Image (cartoon, coloured by chain):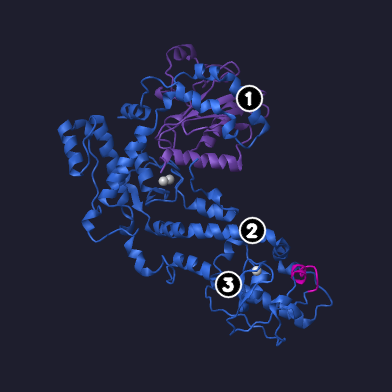
Chain colours: A blue, B purple
Amino acid sequence: MMDVPDPSDFPTPDLRALDASLRCTICGELYDGPVMLTGCGHCFCSVCVRQHIQRESDCPSCRMKTSEVAFRPNSVLEEVVGAWKEARKHVLDMARVEQTLAARSHASVALQTIPESSNPPSASVTPSSARSLKRKRRNVDYVSDSESSEVVLVDGSPTPKKRPGKVSKVSRANRGSEQPSSDPEEIPLDPNSNEIIDCPMCGKRVPLRSINPHIDSGCKDVGRPPSKISLSPTKARNNNAKTQWSSLFGAGGGSSGGPDSKGKGKGKDRSSPSEIPTERLANASYDVLKDKQIKQLLAEQNLPTTGDRKAWIRRHKHYLIIHNATLDKAMKNRSTFAELRQELKHWEDEKAKKPASAGVSDVVEYTKANDGEFKRLVQEARRNTKKPPPKDASPGISGQSEKTPSPVAPDIPVKSEDMET
Amino acid sequence: MASISARRLKKELTEINHEGTPTGIKLLSADDFETWFFSIEVLGNTLYQGEVFKLMFRFDGHYPISSPAVQFVVDQTHQAPIHPHVYSNGHICASILGNDWSPVLSVASVCITLQSMLASCKSKERPPDNDRYVAHAPDNPKKTRFHYDVDRV
Ligand SMILES: [Zn+2]
Ligand SMILES: [Zn+2]
Ligand SMILES: [Zn+2]
């Protein structure tokens, strides 16, 4: 089955919610040329709400009356979605890596989830070690709050330099239940050190100066819930992640980032602006137009005039939608005329390919013929409340529907359109 | 790239597989993006206690801009619920499937609406024009122009 990106791709609810919030509630895709309806403020892809508005003159979400003149391009949202599209795969990768690491070192993760105040107070905590612990935590917080990757941890205690390998797994992992006499185990931090070491916990290559926050976080780099961790500078010190993130902010250094690449859109040749639509097309009253005039409308947009009058109208209507929808996008995101025509052709091909849903011509007959199969399916579904029966468990269904198409499958969508017009 | 309707349905299927269906509603089969079947029962103290119905969804290439064709399945093991808005052939007179359809609605939200339509039923009876309608009903309920009562569902 096809792979359709979806909020459920993400392992954590916060990232799922983020991904879902950037999706159009009509098509379920990340907003494509989002427009806001000025009456109510709801947002949809321009092309989605323009298709809807042909049938109903209300907001799909709240049903407030609306029309095309109430659509306003939401350019801020368009940029947010653009950045998210770039970052989504990286965030997905990182979230998955994070999950794996968390599973591997869940002892450390457990420590992380204990709020600072719940650390068992102990008489044996020396003031210095307590202060040290506190300072360490504050530093970690500082690092994670800052967006600068230049923040350097400074440990005031002049402990002798120890080899990182001496940080034992046990002492780290059990720190939550032990006295926080962590200073001796602390890997000394030299702010000027550029040394890269192997993390004793996870084996990753980590700059020496960021090894402590790295380990403190259970090898998740900083002590924050997964979704917030991602922006941490310690993560950015990892070379790989750095390029990934910089492409999100266009901070340069990344392969795809940089302010220069911004204006170039999807890498298309934008040298001839005449290739990009700049003017809106007005709706036509097809009913009062003669065949010749409709063909003329198509010709004006360099569209084919194959098919019958019905096909022309349908073609012109949809072209109008995608043409006007692309005008709701920032210049760099707009489709060229050629791309619009390609899109229109794709749309027509899809519609032609799709068999009419009335293919199951007689429901009663159809279900009777499959009755035994259905009984089995019901039983199966009862046993398995959440999951649908596996694909191979019901080979008869789709096969049967192919065998019983009505000879002249009526095109329902077109018919209902006709009824409305 | 698959069509908008197929992609949207795939997302709904993914959500159903992840989150499960609402209580009393089960996915029976969704082998393609044209026809899905659900079982539906009304839990709790209602007129339909112990009855299990079967719903069929049919989608055209314009879903979700256009509504799905939804009806109760009538066969040897299933009957349409006896309800003032449900014809004995399984067709349903519900505004959400017609005029009040919105593309932000989903298969799951239709199931829930129909479930609550049954749950709120006060007396089990067929629509007054049942026999007349069933005799001439089109195969696809979407071709019927239902007139919705004041108590829209
Ligand atoms: Zn959309
Ligand atoms: Zn609204
Ligand atoms: Zn590590």
Q: Residue furthest right?
A: A123
**Disc 3 marks which residue?**
A234
**Was residue A177 drawn as part of the magenta stretch in this picture?**
yes
Question: Label 1 sits on what residue type?
Answer: Arg
The location of residue B98, given as percent across then percent down, is: 43, 29
Ligand 3 closer than 8 Å to the CB at disc 2? no
Which residue is at 66% across, 72% downward? A199
Q: Nearer the viewer, residue A371 or B61?
A: A371
* Image vertical order of residue A40 relative to residue A297, above or below: below
Q: Which mark is residue A100?
A: 2
Of pointers 3 and 1, the one earlier in the residue sequence:
3
Please tell me how crowded label 3 is: few (under 14), some (14-19), or many (20+) other residues with Cα within 10 Å: many
What is the CA distance from the residue labelled 3 to the residue labelled 2? 19 Å
Residue on which disc 1 sits: A376
Amino acid type for the residue under numbered disc 3: Thr
Give the mark nearest the N terminus, 2 or 1: 2
Q: Secondary structure at mark 1?
A: helix
Q: Nearer the viewer, mark 3 or mark 2?
A: 2
Q: Specify the amino acid type for callout 2.
A: Thr
Q: Is residue A47 left or right of residue A361?
A: left
Crowdedness near tag 1: few (<14), some (14–19) or many (≥20) residues, C-alpha within 10 Å: some
- Confirm whether circles 3 and 1 share one chain: yes
Q: Which residues are magenta?
A: A169-179
Q: Nearer the viewer, residue B70 or A155?
A: A155
Badge count: 3
Position of residue A207 in the picture relative to residue A352 (left or right):
right
